[in-house]
């Protein structure tokens, strides 16, 4: 018979979610940062700002793109049992499909076949244009 503590722990594992929002950029001391807030909604982990940084020389080519933060967060979210990632930004449906394929390979290599894949949710989906289109 399962005790109440393990039942509660199993419940928490079933509802864990990650949220990525508050996208922003900043310049400081000759450096450029793009940041986003990562919240493990139901997991006992602190809210953190994830960031990418470069020298101000390259700032023209440096954007605060939600794709970068999704790619950087998906493997830790899957590893720690999150059930979904909610991005408060625009995501390409083709990127989403390919990240799901990556998760399928990771599950195949490292986890039991019945491990659930996490869901990628976005408030806005971008339209993708094939590279060879006119």
Image (cartoon, rainbow, N blue to C red):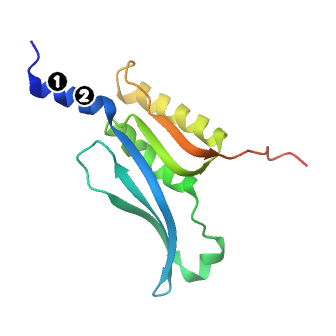
Q: Is residue 69 above or below residue 123?
A: below
- Residue 40, percent from left and from top: 33, 47
Residue under the image location 60 percent in, 82 percent down: 57
Residue under the image location 43 percent in, 25 percent down: 108
Query: How many numbered markers are drawn?
Result: 2
Residue under the image location 45 percent in, 44 percent down: 74
Q: Which residue is mark 1?
A: 7
Query: Which type of secondary structure does the marked residue at label 1 adopt?
Result: helix
| Disc 1 residue crowd, few under 14, some 14–19, many 20+, Cα 10 Å | few
- Residue 119, percent from left and from top: 48, 34
- Residue 106, percent from left and from top: 43, 32
Query: Which type of secondary structure does the marked residue at label 2 adopt?
Result: helix
The residue nearer to you, when weighing 109 against 58, is 58
Residue furthest to the front: 123
Residue furthest to the top: 1
* Picture disc at residue 63: none
Residue under the image location 35 percent in, 21 percent down: 112
Is mark 1 in CB contact (under 8 Å) with mark 2? yes
Q: Could you tell me if residue 32 is visible in this image?
A: no
**Residue 60: quadrant of the picture:** bottom right
- Residue 114, percent from left and from top: 38, 18
Report the Cα–Cα distance between label 1 and label 2. 6 Å
**Residue 84: quadrant of the picture:** top left
Q: Is residue 80 above or below residue 56?
A: above
Quadrant holding the N terminus:
top left
Q: Which residue is mark 2?
A: 11
Residue furthest to the right: 134
């Amino acid at each position: 018979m399962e005790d109440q503590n393990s039942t509660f722990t199993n419940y928490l594992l079933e509802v864990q979610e990650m949220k990525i929002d508050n996208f922003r950029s900043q310049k400081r001391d000759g450096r450029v940062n793009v940041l986003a807030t990562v919240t493990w909604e139901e997991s006992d982990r602190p809210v953190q700002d994830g960031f990418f940084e470069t020298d101000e020389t390259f700032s023209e080519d440096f954007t605060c793109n939600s794709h970068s933060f999704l790619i950087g967060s998906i493997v830790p979210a899957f590893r720690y049992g999150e059930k979904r990632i909610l991005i408060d930004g625009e995501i390409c449906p083709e990127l989403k499909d390919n990240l799901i394929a990556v998760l399928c390979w990771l599950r195949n290599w490292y986890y039991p076949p019945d491990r659930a894949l996490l869901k990628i949710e976005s408030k806005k989906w971008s339209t993708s244009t094939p590279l060879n289109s006119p």
